[in-house]
Amino acid sequence: MLVLGINHILNWCQVLSNGRRYTCHTKKINGELFFYFKKEWHRVLDYASQYMNEFK
């Protein structure tokens, strides 16, 4: 799983998993950004790509 992009304005991020792209809802918990994927919250920094785009 890999985070390709984050859109802070619309509160979503784009995730690549098994060759497919998913758009996931994001949320700040204790100052850290998390995304909701397959009924679980995952920390964005754990899956961030070095080529990730970030829109603010």
Image (cartoon, grey):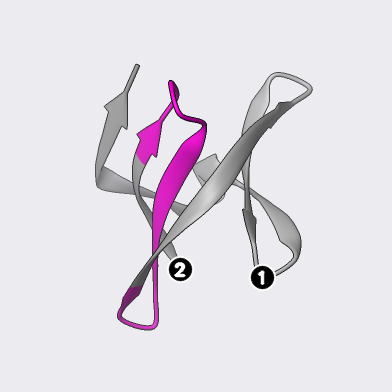
Based on the displayed image, in which of its 4 quarters is residue 7 positioned? Answer: top left
How far from the left and from the top, in percent, is residue 19? 30, 81
Q: Mark 2 points at which residue?
A: 1
Give whichever of 45, 10 is nearer the camera: 10
- Location of the C terminus (image quadrant): top left
- The region drawn magenta spans 6-20
Q: Which of marks 2 and 1 is nearer the N terminus?
A: 2
Checking the image for residue 38, the label placed there is 1
| Circle 2/circle 1 CB separation < 8 Å | no
Q: Name the residue type under label 1.
A: Lys
- In the image: residue 21, left or right of residue 53: right
Give whichever of 26, 47 is nearer the camera: 26
Q: Main secondary structure of the magenta part?
A: strand
- In the image: residue 30, left or right of residue 15: right
> Is residue 34 depicted above or below 21 in this figure?
above
Q: Name the residue type under label 2.
A: Met
Look at the numbered disc 2 and give the secondary structure of its residue: loop
Based on the displayed image, in which of its 4 quarters is residue 31 positioned? Answer: top right
Could you tell me how far apart the alpha carbons at marks 2 and 1 are, in whole angstroms? 12 Å
> Is residue 42 depicted above or below 40 in this figure?
above
Q: Name, please, the residue furthest toward the right.
A: 30
